[in-house]
Image (spheres, rainbow, N blue to C red):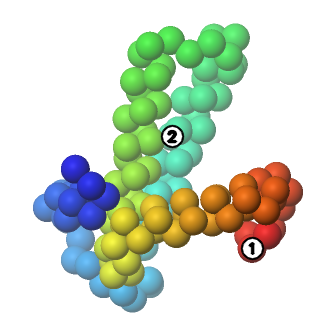
Amino acid sequence: MDFNEYQKAIIKYDLGVATDKVSNPDFMDKILGLVGESGEVAEKFKKVIRDKNSEMSEVDREEIAKELGDVLWYIATIARYMEVPLEEIVKKNLDKAQSRYERGKISGSGDNR
Ligand SMILES: [Mg+2]
């Protein structure tokens, strides 16, 4: 399955109605959902650090991978609301990383370095 297929396949799980109006409750739900699911990823890592001497079990890996999937769902859905194919986001991100790599700018700061 490619990225755009995934983005289309998950539409049926979205209870909202796609809109490009960011303040629409259906759109806000996705923005807040992305933050919430990202927080769930961080929380699971925190517990591995705090309770397991930073060593992930296989169950931890599976649970964190599920949460990363939830993050992906929100990214794909937000992109759909914005009418941006997920494949385009992936490609532009890869192009950016490759450019930084070729220019020796992987480390450092700034969105447009
Ligand atoms: Mg989750």
| Label annotation for residue 94 | none
Q: Position of residue 72 (x, y in %)?
A: 40, 52
Residue furthest to the right in view is 108
Which dot, 2 or 1, sits closer to the camera?
1
Residue found at the very far left of the displayed protein: 12
Q: Amino acid at mark 2?
A: Glu
Q: Position of residue 14 (x, y in %)?
A: 22, 63
Q: Quadrant of residue 6?
A: bottom left
Q: Quadrant of the C terminus?
A: bottom right
Task: Answer above or below: position of 112 versus 37.
Answer: below
Residue picked out by circle 1: 112
Q: Nearer the viewer, residue 23 or 84?
A: 84
Say which of 109 and 14 sits in front.
109
Residue 104 horizontal side relative to residue 83, left or right: right
Whether residue 51 is visible to the viewer of this picture, yes or no, is no
> Between marks 2 and 1, how big is the CA–CA gap?
28 Å
Mark 1 C-beta to ligand 1 under 8 Å:
no
Q: Which residue is mark 2?
A: 40
Tell me which numbered mark, 2 or 1, is placed earlier along the sequence. Answer: 2
**Which residue shows up at 54% across the image and 60% down it?**
94
User: Which residue is depicted at the point 44% across and 84% down?
Assistant: 23
Residue 78, quarter of picture: bottom left
Q: Check if mark 2's residue and mark 1's residue have beta carbons within 8 Å.
A: no
Q: Label 1 sits on what residue type? A: Asn
| Nearer to us in this view, 25 or 59 | 59
- Determine if residue 101 is in view: yes
Q: Is mark 2 within 8 Å of ligand 1?
A: yes
Q: Who's the residue at 68% across and 65% down the image?
A: 99
